[in-house]
Amino acid sequence: MIPIAKPVISEREKQMVLEVLELGELASGRKVAEFEEKFCRYAGHKFAVATSSGTTALHVALQACGIKFGDKVLTTPFSFIATANSLLFCGAQPVFCDIDENTFNISPDSIRYVLGREKGIKALLIVHLFGLACDMGEIEKIVEEYNLVLIEDCAQAHGATFNGRHVGTFGRAGIFSFYPTKNMTSSEGGIVLTGDERVYQEVLLLRNHGMTGDNDHAVLGYNFRMTNISAAIGIGQLERLDEFVAKRRENASYFNVHLKDLPGIRIPYVPSKNYVHSYNQYTLRVLDDREGFTRALREHGVGCKIYYPMTIPDQVFYKKLGFSGEVCPLARKVSSEVVSIPVHPALSERDLERIVESIGEYCRVSYKR
Ligand SMILES: *Cc1c(COP(=O)(O)O)cnc(C)c1O
């Protein structure tokens, strides 16, 4: 089976992990500091704080940006559940907008619509889903007009840019995940980017028990630290991130050429030249009988996955809290159509051909015009 995701680990990462093990400084230390500095430079921003996961990065980033109990925060219903969960961790109230059905990202029109009806919105948490930046031109206008705090979930978007600017540098804070299915990995891990020194200092405190001195603890903090072992992997991966993203984009171009005219499916949409899509996922829309499509692919040995089969407000736990996906009909529609296929840099030429052949065969037979 061609897997839907596969990390590419080289000798360099193995060597650096061994060095950390031999040195014995296993927990957080110099490797983490080096990784933070290098990631910061890569994205072209001021401050970075590495954490134990993307989820913990998001949690402390929101908290450091002042999101607290009772605050209303606009966000997307179509994402991994950790996005909205991190608002709940802060005691905040997610207010779900709808998405643009072409880009899969939060829709600026929907944001304006909700802002017009719901008073007292404090912040906006966006997700650059699958590696495509949100419409930052419109979003920056809205943020200014309504004086919102902007936080970016870039867990899937390392290497993605809008107007040449790296995602994660638009908001008061941006976070990335280094889980093994993302564009680069540190095993588990995450990072907060910010240009705001106060947010930076607060994230530092929250990450490490709120510790200010030897045994002084100024705030209620957590243990969300990254280990030096993870950071060593992350440093090696970061050196190859541009190469990984280029390969993802090459694979996506190949799919675009070979899948664009097939009946019954739509290839991912990229709005304009202002956007560099980093293709953490290559996500098709299958307009009819998605079940049959995924079954056929798997029978041909092509791993595929549905991100996401359900909107966040339609999840059992969110329904219990009184949320409903009725507020986001387009997200609901899209969640019934999407299928992601392998696009990762470990794919061989033969893999790419096999994926295209399998899809072509199925579509030509099943979705005859
Ligand atoms: C992966 C992911 C996260 C969480 O990252 P972890 O490192 O798995 O905790 C958050 N948001 C989105 C959109 C993600 O894809």
Image: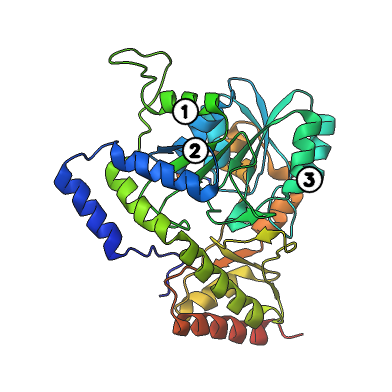
Q: Given the image, on which type of amino acid does mark 3 rest?
A: Glu
Mark 3, secondary structure of its residue: helix
Q: Sequence-wise, which precedes: disc 3 or disc 2?
A: 3
For the residues marked 1 and 2, what is the alpha-carbon distance in whole angstroms? 8 Å
Residue occupying image coordinates x 58% and y 44%: 168
* Residue under pointer 1: 203
Q: Residue 115 lies in what quarter of the image?
A: top right
**How many angstroms separate mark 3 from mark 1 (CA)?**
28 Å
Quarter assignment of residue 149: top right
Residue 97, by quadrant, is top right
Tell me residue 265's x, y (percent).
Answer: 69, 74
Q: Earlier in the sequence, mark 1 or mark 2?
A: 2
Q: Nearer the viewer, residue 208 or 90?
A: 208
* Picture quarter with the N terminus: bottom left
What residue did someone put label 2 on?
Answer: 192
Q: Earlier in the sequence, mark 3 or mark 1?
A: 3
Which residue is label 3 attached to?
A: 138
The way the protein has been coloured in the rendering is: rainbow
Does residue 359 appear in this view?
Answer: yes
At x 68% / y 51%, what residue is drawn?
A: 105
| Left or right: 329, with 155 as reference point | right
Instruction: Please tell me whether mark 1 sits on a helix, a strand or a loop.
Output: helix
Q: Does the closest atom of ligand 1 sit within 8 Å of the Cβ of label 1?
A: no
